[in-house]
Image (tube, helix red, strand yellow):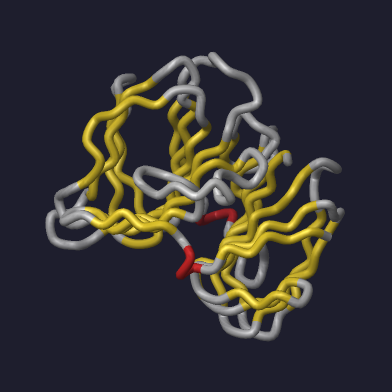
Amino acid sequence: MKKVLDKAESRGRSLYDWLDSHHTFSFDEYYNPRRMNFGALRVLNDDRIAPGKGFGTHPHKNMEIISIPLKGKLKHGDSHQNSRVITVGDIQTMSAGTGIYHSEMNGSETESAEFLQIWIMPEKLGTPPVYKDYDIRPFLHKNKMSLIVSPDNDAPARLQQQTWFSIGEIEAGKKIEYHLHQSHGGVYIFLIEGEVKVDDTVLSRRDGLGVYETHSFELETFKDSHILFIEVPM
């Protein structure tokens, strides 16, 4: 097994009056040639948006994008007349394909919104743009990593890449084993909250760990933890 560790405090940061964003990989004004991507995982931003503010209308092209709310309300609008407000327990996916314009705003005028913005490089270029949102609450189970995104129909959401997202809230003192879906894949473990150990590496809140050249790994929780697995082609 090979590993790459990205500690929370080592991430890049964009700080504005309306946005506090931490970048695991190079993004915006943060550039680190050693932190460009993990396989097909290109962007993992940990965003906090001020009340009533957000990302105005802007374009995307040939990228698979998933947003996972962690707090508050996230309001989406796009050039295909989609308009949604999602909150904790929902996710949204967007295949930008040939091109789409969209906005991502805080849906509240009084409370901040927090979400993970994740970009995956697509398997094919030039596909038709698609936006969808999903209620993942029925699929979540205590002390289990629940599959929420896959390239086929065995998860609530689908992206146009060989990628699998699993998320879960795991109590302290548990062990979780993960088996990769593809021989050429890797898994990026992002610890939303808590403390865990993978192999001999301990992760704390907002740390990331990429593991690859392995068929499986075991994760042990030291504290109650909220965990995200992102499996991608390497």
Quarter of the image that includes the C terminus: top right
Q: In the visual, does 103 lie left or right of 4?
A: left
Q: Is residue 141 above or below residue 136?
A: below
Residue at x 67%, y 57% (from the top left corner): 210
User: In the rendering, at what x and y percent does residue 86 appear?
Assistant: 35, 47
Q: Is residue 234 above or below residue 52?
A: above
Residue at x 26%, y 57% (from the top left corner): 15
User: In the rendering, at what x and y percent does residue 169 appear?
Assistant: 57, 70
Most foreground residue, 14 or 172: 14
Residue 107 appears in the figure: yes
User: In the rendering, at what x and y percent does residue 55 appear?
Assistant: 25, 40
Q: In the visual, does 99 lie left or right of 34?
A: left
Residue 135 appears in the figure: no
Q: In the visual, does 84 lie left or right of 63?
A: left
Residue at x 33%, y 25% (from the top left corner): 59
Q: In the visual, does 12 lie left or right of 151?
A: left
Q: How many marks overall?
A: 0
Residue at x 83%, y 59% (from the top left corner): 216
Q: Is residue 145 above or below residue 233?
A: below
Q: Quadrant of residue 166?
A: bottom right
Q: Is residue 38 above or below residue 15?
A: above
User: In the rendering, at what x and y percent does residue 217 appear?
Assistant: 80, 64
Quarter of the image that includes the N terminus: bottom right
Q: Quadrant of residue 88?
A: bottom left
